[in-house]
Amino acid sequence: MTQPQTQATRPTVTYIKGDMVLFRNVERFWLGLPGHTFVGRVERSWTHVDTGKVLYDLTELGSLSYRVGIDPDYMRPLPATDAMHDIDTGAMTLAAVACLRQHLVRDAAALPAPR
């Protein structure tokens, strides 16, 4: 007996200006071309006049390129809690700790002497 194929559905996410997202350019991805996935910041949302679908304009953070008409089906949120998890849990790598120490030493040298 064959089981019917089911397609996984994911909840609709609404993004607002300033949200950090991961975007995949589906054409470049399926063609095996490089540069298909990038981190972006949502700049605005708008509704396509023909399809009625909400699309987004993003700034690609790696190159500061402006991308217009991004389909949210190929976007995923990058929550701050995920980005800060290693710091919140104390699970930072030794390299990250060394980097922070370098910044602290450099920034402390730039501060005025205490009075």
Image: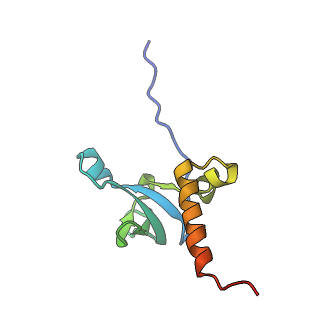
Where is residue 17? Give x, y as percent: 53, 72
Residue 49 drawn at (x, y percent):
39, 70
In what quadrant of the picture does the C terminus appear? bottom right
Residue drawn where x is 62% and y is 50% of the image: 86
In the displayed structure, would residue 68 be above or below residue 31?
below
Which image quadrant: the N terminus? top left
Along the line of sight, the residue nearer the viewer: 84 or 32:
84
Question: How many numbered marks does the figure carry?
Answer: 0
Front in this rendered view, residue 64 or 23: 64
Q: Name the one closer to the observer, 48 or 37.
A: 37
Q: Is residue 25 above or below residue 105?
A: above
Q: Is residue 44 left or right of residue 30?
A: right
Instruction: Identify the residue shown where x is 45% and y is 24%.
Output: 4
Q: Residue furthest top?
A: 1
Hey, which quadrant is residue 105 in on the image?
bottom right
Which residue is rendered at x = 27% and y = 45% of the image? 30
> Would you place residue 49 above or below residue 5 in this image?
below
* Vertical relation: 7 (above or below) 11: above
Residue 15 in the image: state x and y as whole percent: 54, 64
Horizontal side of residue 85 vs 39, given as left or right: right
Residue 60: x and y in percent read 39, 67
Q: Of residues 114 and 51, which is closer to you in this image?
A: 114
Tell me the colour scheme of the image. rainbow
